[in-house]
Image (cartoon, rainbow, N blue to C red):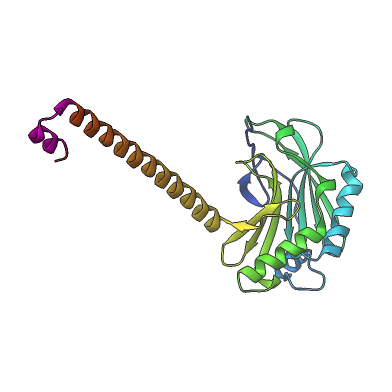
């Protein structure tokens, strides 16, 4: 059975592995990162820029590296990677200008590391850009209205998932291949529809069974009444 780990670090609380990281950005880097917009030419939402940033991480973890999460912001990336240890990992922050900061990570939680990682090779920057644009369109905005994109293991299904977050606090999710883009409202409606269909089917079956039972009772009553007209009439009342 899949058991999600939980993580907490420089991005705040999120589902995955609890980690603590040391290190800080300069004030200028922090300001530049925060002020970056999703629609900027240098935005990390753009496939070419994201691929370049991931290339910096691949150089550190290898082409076969395993990730705990990828967090894409317009001005930078934060990548949490496995070191192969159950209690130690690596976090990388990659700036738009290519600067890379590495910070140590301490992993804790009830889950197993192997259940909470996915290969960096499975990440397709063009899929991330496409999902960001599709989410922006669905939310009637542009890339400036997208705050960040997160790729990580979904704690419910145990499979890798990409979440795209809009500035209106709504988010859409899809698989790493970009298929089946949906939001939580759609998921809730689908669940309610499925429940409604199940209830309707059960009600129909119950009515059919009750009808069949009633018909059987009438048949037995008429049979027992024989030629007594009064008793036969009573059977149908």
Percent position of residue 190, x then y: 52, 53
Give the residue at x 78% y 59%.
127
Q: Which residues are magenta?
A: 224-235
On the picture, is 180 further left or further right than 204? right
Q: Main secondary structure of the magenta part?
A: helix
Percent position of residue 87, x then y: 73, 31
On the picture, is 166 further left or further right than 117? left
Q: Quadrant of the N terminus?
A: top right
The vertical placement of 180 against 28, above or below, is above
Q: Quadrant of the C terminus?
A: top left
Report the number of discs: 0
Quadrant position of residue 129: bottom right
The vertical placement of 167 against 231, above or below, is below
On the picture, is 166 further left or further right than 90? left
Percent position of residue 194, x then y: 49, 48
The vertical placement of 15 against 145, above or below, is above
37 vs 123, nearest the viewer: 123
Instruction: Residue 235: tell me if it is visible.
Output: yes
Quadrant position of residue 43: bottom right
On the picture, is 210 further left or further right than 107? left
Instruction: Residue 26: tell me if it is visible.
Output: no
């Amino acid at each position: 059975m899949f058991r999600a780990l939980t993580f907490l670090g420089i991005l705040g609380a999120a589902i995955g592995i609890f980690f603590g990281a040391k290190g800080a950005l300069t004030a200028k880097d922090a300001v530049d990162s925060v002020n970056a917009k999703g629609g900027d030419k240098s935005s990390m939402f753009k496939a070419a820029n994201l691929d370049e940033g991931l290339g910096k991480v691949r150089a550190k973890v290898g082409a076969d590296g395993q990730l705990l999460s990828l967090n894409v912001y317009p001005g930078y990336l934060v990548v949490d990677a496995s070191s192969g240890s159950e209690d130690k990992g690596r976090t990388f922050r990659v700036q738009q200008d290519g600067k890379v900061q590495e910070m140590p990570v301490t992993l804790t939680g009830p889950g197993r590391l192997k259940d909470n990682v996915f290969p960096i090779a499975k990440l397709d920057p063009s899929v991330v850009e496409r999902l960001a644009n599709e989410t922006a369109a669905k939310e009637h905005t542009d890339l400036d209205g997208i705050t960040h994109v997160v790729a990580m293991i979904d704690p419910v299904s145990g499979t890798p998932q990409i979440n795209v977050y809009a500035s209106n606090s709504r988010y859409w999710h899809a698989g790493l291949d970009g298929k089946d883009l949906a939001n939580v409202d759609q998921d809730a409606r689908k669940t309610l529809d499925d429940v409604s269909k199940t209830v309707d089917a059960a009600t129909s079956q119950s009515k059919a069974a009750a009808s069949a039972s009633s018909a059987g009772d009438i048949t037995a009553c008429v049979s027992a009444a024989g030629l007594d007209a009064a008793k036969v009439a009573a059977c149908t009342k």
